[in-house]
Image (cartoon, rainbow, N blue to C red):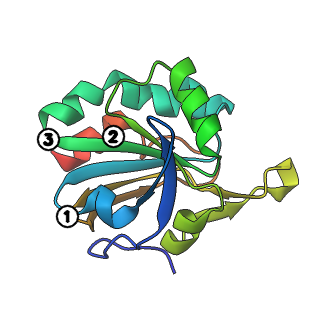
Amino acid sequence: MTIQIGDRIPEVILKRIREGVETIDTRALFEGRKAVLFAVPGAFTPTCSEKHLPSYVQHFDQFRHRGIDVFCVSVNDPFVMQAWGKTQHVPDGLQMLADGNADLVRALGLEMDASAYGMGTRARRFALYVEDGVVRNLFVEAPGEYQVSSAEHVLEQIG
């Protein structure tokens, strides 16, 4: 079942790289804060690299001024996420999270089967606005679309 507005983010372990590979659970990421989590089907893929991540890089300061943390997640390993973040000039504070086994996207009910493209299970393109671990807004794209999960749209919707 797909996560709904009012649901708590499921507790799942993710990876990120800071001083080395770190393990972090979603409870630690989301409790006590406002955050946007946006997901992309794959690092270095065309729409993800040309539009989706760049929209959050461009508008990162607007989220920060509103006291909102920003997290990008993809079903990739933490080394890929780190490398992609560097090529996209991701600012300090915009966290690049690896959901290598698709545990989070499955728990959210927002996975997709990209086996036909040789990519296995991936995240659907989406964004969530979360306050203290609870989903307040949910923006899930139709297959092949990029509109409602953009930074611009999310900023407009969360006021």
- The mark that comes first in sequence, 1 or 3, is 3
Residue extending furthest toward the front: 19
**Image point 63% across, 53% down: which residue?**
143
Residue 58: percent from left, percent from top = 35, 22
The three-letter code of the residue at mark 1 reads: Asp
Q: Residue at x 49, y 75 (%)?
A: 2
Residue ID for mark 1: 132
| Separation of marks 3 and 2 at Cα, in angstroms | 17 Å
Amino acid at dot 3: Gly
Q: Relative to 151, is 88 on the left or the right?
A: right
Report helix, strand or loop for mark 1: loop
Nearer to us of marks 1 and 2 is 1
Q: Secondary structure at mark 2?
A: helix
- Rendered image: mark on residue 12: none
Q: Position of residue 4 (x, y in %)?
A: 37, 74
Of the numbered discs 3 and 2, the one sitting upstream in the chain is 3
Q: Can the viewer see residue 107?
A: yes
Considering depth in this image, is 127 or 13 the residue closer to the camera?
A: 13
Mark 1 crowd level (few <14, some 14–19, many ≥20, 10 Å Cα):
some
The label on residue 153 is 2
Q: Is residue 129 above or below residue 40?
A: below
- Residue 137: in sight, yes or no? no
Residue pointed to by mark 3: 67
- 107 vs 24, left or right, is right
Neighbourhood count class around disc 2 (C-alpha, 10 Å): few under 14, some 14–19, many 20 upward: some
- 3D distance between C-alphas at marks 1 and 3: 13 Å
Closer to the camera in the image, 138 or 85: 85
Question: Across the whole image, how many numbered discs are drawn on residues?
Answer: 3
**Residue displayed at 49% across by 70% down:** 108
Q: Nearer the viewer, residue 116 or 133?
A: 133
